Image: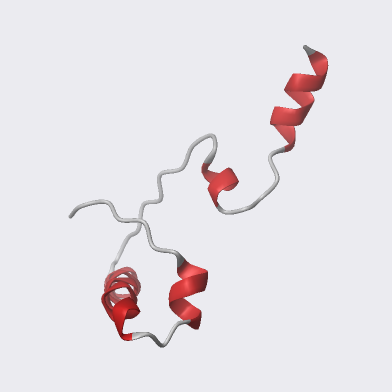
Amino acid sequence: MPIATLDLDHLLASTKQADFPGRAALADVSSSIAKAKRVVVVSGAGISCSSGIPVSHLTTALAND
């Protein structure tokens, strides 16, 4: 399965025909997770940046240099 990026806020608010494939992909992912017996989430440094969560360790590290 190829890795895809979905703009969730946009897709959830949109009713445009052009966004239906993205909404279908989101529904497929949601359904797959709901049916799964186990789910593994791989995360790492910087994952919070793209989701809008402030990253305090970066500003602390820069202030200490």
Q: Where is 2 relative to 24, above or below?
A: above
Q: Residue furthest top?
A: 65
Q: Nearer the viewer, residue 36 or 44?
A: 44
Say which of 39 and 11 sits in front: 11
Numbered-mark total? 0
| Relative image position of residue 51 (x, y in whole percent) | 56, 53
Q: From the top left corner, tell me how far across and down residue 65 is, in percent.
A: 77, 11
Q: In the picture provided, is 60 more to the left or to the right than 40?
A: right
x and y percent of residue 2 in the render? 20, 52
Position of 57 with respect to 11 (left or right) is right
Which residue is drawn at the image coordinates 58% and 46% (left, top)?
A: 48
Indicate the quadrant where residue 54 lies: top right
Q: Does 62 sit above or below residue 44? A: above
Q: Is residue 52 left or right of residue 27?
A: right
Which residue is at the far left?
1
Q: Residue furthest right?
A: 63
Q: Residue at 45% x, 82% y: name it.
A: 14
| Residue 31 % position (x, y) | 30, 76
Q: Quadrant of residue 63?
A: top right
Relative to 60, residue 35 above or below? below
Q: Quadrant of the N terminus?
A: bottom left
Q: What kind of colouring is applied to the model shown?
A: secondary structure
Q: Residue at x 47, y 79 (%)?
A: 12
Above/below status of 45 relative to 20: above
Q: In the image, 52: left or right of 36? A: right
Q: Residue at x 52, y 71 (%)?
A: 9
